[in-house]
Amino acid sequence: SHAERSNQRYGFYRPGIEQEARIQYELENDLHFSIERGELFVMYQPFVYGSEGATKGMEALLRWKHPVHGMIPPSTFIPMAEENGLIHQLGRWVLEEVCREAGPVLKRNRSWTAAVNLSSRQLEHSGFIEELPGIVHAYGVEPDQLELEITERTMMQPERMLPVLNRLKAYGFRLSLDDFGTGYSSLSQLKELPVDTLKIDRSFIEDMNETQKNAAIVQTIIHAARNLNMKVVAEGIEEAEQAQELLEMACFYFQGYYFSVPKTIQEFPWSREA
Ligand code: C2E
Ligand code: MG
Ligand code: MG
Ligand code: MG
């Protein structure tokens, strides 16, 4: 057809742009059917404690396997879902899936927690927040074994978010501030938040060795967490040296490819034990 021919011609001069827009459109459309078509699944990345790297729990990371375009990263489809409102449905699905497939693991390991990411749009939807306790109870999972991760940037308006966080705490969930260090929380704001855990953003860990400034930021976050009685987790550990340096700075919880990449629940040794 004419359209196809002109597409091909343009394609030569503007590689990818039209096609990218078309794929974007296709994905936005297909995301609506991803749940019913069984294209979503959850991967789990352990977080570990101490020099031995003992598992203490895991973070649930959502995956979408598109039948034509393959694995679509959450950085692509989560913003789409936030834009078109599908995020509430996806969020409910993730929490249910985590309770269903990771619930037995949590019951066998009562001190472990499973972390689930929530985006700002999800927190703004009171209907969604009210649904959470029911979902967890339906699977017999204790809410204090679920840690809801909220990015520090979401906390830019703490006065708006505080009632929601207090509500989640009242339901018994644990709360974690994700990507910490990339937002602008002051210590005085931080002490008002009912947060259990700070997760130091990967970017500070990445070049901690090369950049003294990053090491100083990491040390400051670790001190702040200790003073506020919060747990601190370092994300994105890729080398033994990073974990070693963090241990010396009194950070004991780690997550990263060095310990384990995200895996399906079946790939974990603990899911095979019972
Ligand atoms: P996040 O919550 O900060 O998750 C950590 C990300 O870092 C994950 O990327 C993980 O695979 C990756 N990662 C872990 N260890 C390493 C490492 O050692 N090196 C490097 N380079 N990367 C590492 P992923 O799975 O692509 O997720 C990206 C983001 O998407 C997450 O960042 C989170 O903000 C969001 N996300 C994922 N699942 C969900 C979900 O169910 N709901 C919502 N709202 N957001 C989600
Ligand atoms: Mg996270
Ligand atoms: Mg993070
Ligand atoms: Mg991140």
Image (spheres, rainbow, N blue to C red):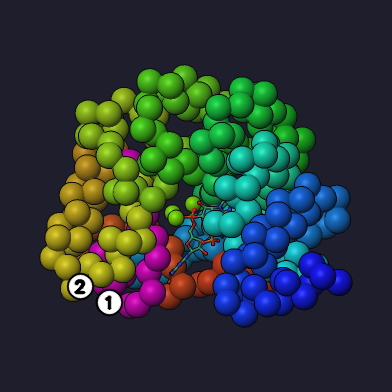
Residue 90 can be seen, yes or no: yes
Q: Residue at x 43, y 36 (%)?
A: 154
Q: Give the residue type that dot 2 points to.
A: Asn
Q: Quadrant of ligand 3?
A: bottom left
Span colored in magenta = 230-247
Return the x and y of residue 111 as percentages of the image width and height.
52, 49
Q: Give the residue type that dot 1 points to.
A: Glu
Of residues 54 and 12, the one nearer the viewer is 12
* Label 1 crowd bin: few (<14), some (14–19), many (20+), radius 10 Å: few
Q: Residue 157, located in which quarter of the rendered image?
A: top left
Q: Is residue 96 above or below residue 44?
A: above
Q: Is disc 2's CB within 8 Å of ligand 1? A: no
Badge 2 marks a residue whose secondary structure is loop
User: Residue tagged by mark 2?
Assistant: 209
> Can you tell which of label 2 and label 1 is closer to the viewer?
2
Of residues 38 and 25, the one nearer the viewer is 25
Quadrant (top left/top right/bottom left/bottom right) for the N terminus: bottom right
The answer to whether residue 235 is left or right of residue 39 is: left
Of residues 105 and 86, the one nearer the viewer is 86
Question: Do labels 2 and 1 touch, CB within 8 Å?
Answer: yes
Return the x and y of residue 128 as percentages of the image width and height.
66, 29
Q: Is residue 224 above or below residue 251?
A: above
Return the x and y of residue 53 as percentages of the image width and height.
42, 69
Residue 266 can be seen, yes or no: no
User: Residue tagged by mark 1?
Assistant: 241
Q: Is residue 234 magenta?
A: yes
Q: Residue at x 42, y 47 (%)?
A: 178
Q: Residue at x 79, y 67 (%)?
A: 3
Q: Residue at x 22, y 34 (%)?
A: 187
Q: Is residue 256 above or below residue 150?
A: below
